[in-house]
Structure formats: C-alpha cells, structure tokens
Image: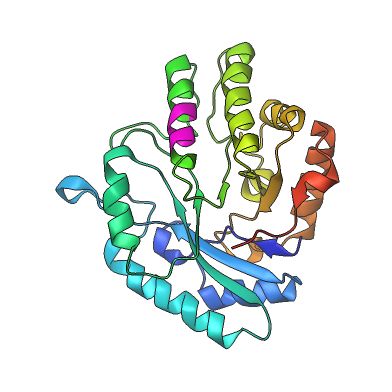
Amino acid sequence: MIANYHTHTYRCRHADGTEREYVEKAIEGGLKILGFSDHTPQVYPNGYQCPVKMEPRELEGYVDTILDLKREYKDDIEIHLGLEVEYLYTLWEPLLRLLEPYPIEYMILGQHYLGNGIDVPFCGAPTYDNESLQAYCRQTREALETGKFLYFAHPDVMWFLGSDDVYTEEMTALCRYCREADIPLEINLLGVREDRNYPRKLFWDIAAREGNSVIYGSDAHHADHVYSPEVIAKADRFVERCGIPRERILDVMEI
C-alpha cells in the first residue's frame, strides 16, 4: 500500500490527533500519497448540525491546514485535499455551493444516512427491511451518477440481515453499475481493523464476480491507523478469500 485517500481530522468529532501527526505516520509507514477526506460539512435546515461532521464554519480552517502541510511536506510525501461526502437529496446543491470557493481536489462517497440525513437510521445499523436496502442502492447510484466522486467508500456499510437473495440482486446491480462507470470500490481498513459488519464477504464475492476495481482506504481516525502492515495483511487475506485478483487492486488514483 503506497497511497491512502481516506483520512479524517479532529473536526469530525470522532477522530483525534493533529493533521501533522497523520502526515508523519504516513511518511514513517512509507506511503507516497496521503489524501485527507474528512466528513464534509452540510448546510442543514433549521440550524441542525450533524454530530459526526465538521461544521461549515470549520471548512476554511480545514482547507488552509491541509494546504499548508501540502506545501511544507512537498519533498517528502504527496498530499491531497479531499472530503468524504454524503449525497443527501435536497442538500446536494447547497453543498456544492458551499464547496465552490475552495480548491477541493477530490470527493469520496461515504453514505452513512439516507434521504436528507436527518431523523433517519444509520446505514450501519442492522435491518431486515428490503426497502432500506433498495433505498441505499438507489441513493448511492444517483450520487455516483453525478460524476463527482473519485471512488465509493465502504460500499458495503449497509448492514442488511434479510434475504441473501435480495441482497445479492440489489448489490449485483450496484456493483455492475460501478464497474461500467469505472468507479472503484473501497475495502475499508477501519472495518477490517475493528471486525465491523463490513467488509462483508457476500458483497465482495459479488464484486469479484462483477470485475470491480478495488482500492484500500485506511479510514484513519487516529494517526496510528494511517498505515498498519497487520491490518493490510488481514485485508489481503480477505480479498484473496473473495477471489479478487491482485491486478484489480489499485495502488493509486488519478486526481
């Protein structure tokens, strides 16, 4: 692993450490590329603020900090400024207007909530509801159809406990679209590290069959998570069990 594009900062309220610490750990681990992609702020109605994202007022400081580090460490590591973004229906255009003045280099899709993201269950909460699974697949596909996203982060975050046949049908269609649109799918190393409900083998069996491209993402919320040989080795074993050939695992992304 020589590149990681999924890195958070303390601004999301569930990560810690300084951005500099993340950069130093990346260099120590031998990474050539580090992309910061903290949870994007959203312009919610009625003053609502999501407790796991930065606030709009923090965006400028985030941008300035990453750009300063990019200049400072330019001879040591390639740093990129990105965001992990949710596609929330009526909030999408306001979000694009919020981001327009800033030199954001890339966005990754990380869909944690559906609809407009308010008063709805977390996608990672267990559910047997077919309609929730279908809504997840529909909303993420609509997001990817905008052409704004570098890749699809933890695409298997949806914790569906219903019929495997239903899951296979819905996720096959989603994976097939991603392959046809040349959108890589992320093996989420935080999920690997913490034995979460993702990566889900059934999903990655489907991705292997459909021929999807794959990228590893650290999803680092602590500096020590930026690069871990043990976690990467565990992910490698998982990918091998799913039958995903090494040549479909991307080392770097073009930004």
Hey, which quadrant is residue 70 in on the image?
Answer: bottom right
Please state the horizontal and vertical placement of residue 40, each as a whole percent of the image: 39, 56
Say above or below: 45 vs 61.
Answer: above
Tell me which residue sits at (71%, 43%) in the image: 213
Say which of 237 and 42 sits in front. Answer: 42
Location of the C terminus by quadrant is bottom right
Say above or below: 154 vs 68.
Answer: above
Q: Main secondary structure of the magenta part?
A: helix
Say above or below: 228 vs 191.
Answer: below
Residue extent of the magenta highlight: 137-142
Say which of 149 and 171 sits in front. Answer: 149
Tell me which residue sits at (61%, 44%) in the image: 183
Say above or below: 199 vs 26.
Answer: above
Location of the N terminus by quadrant is bottom right
Say which of 111 and 17 sits in front. Answer: 111
Please state the horizontal and vertical placement of residue 84, each as a whole percent of the image: 47, 54
Tell me which residue sits at (42%, 70%) in the image: 103
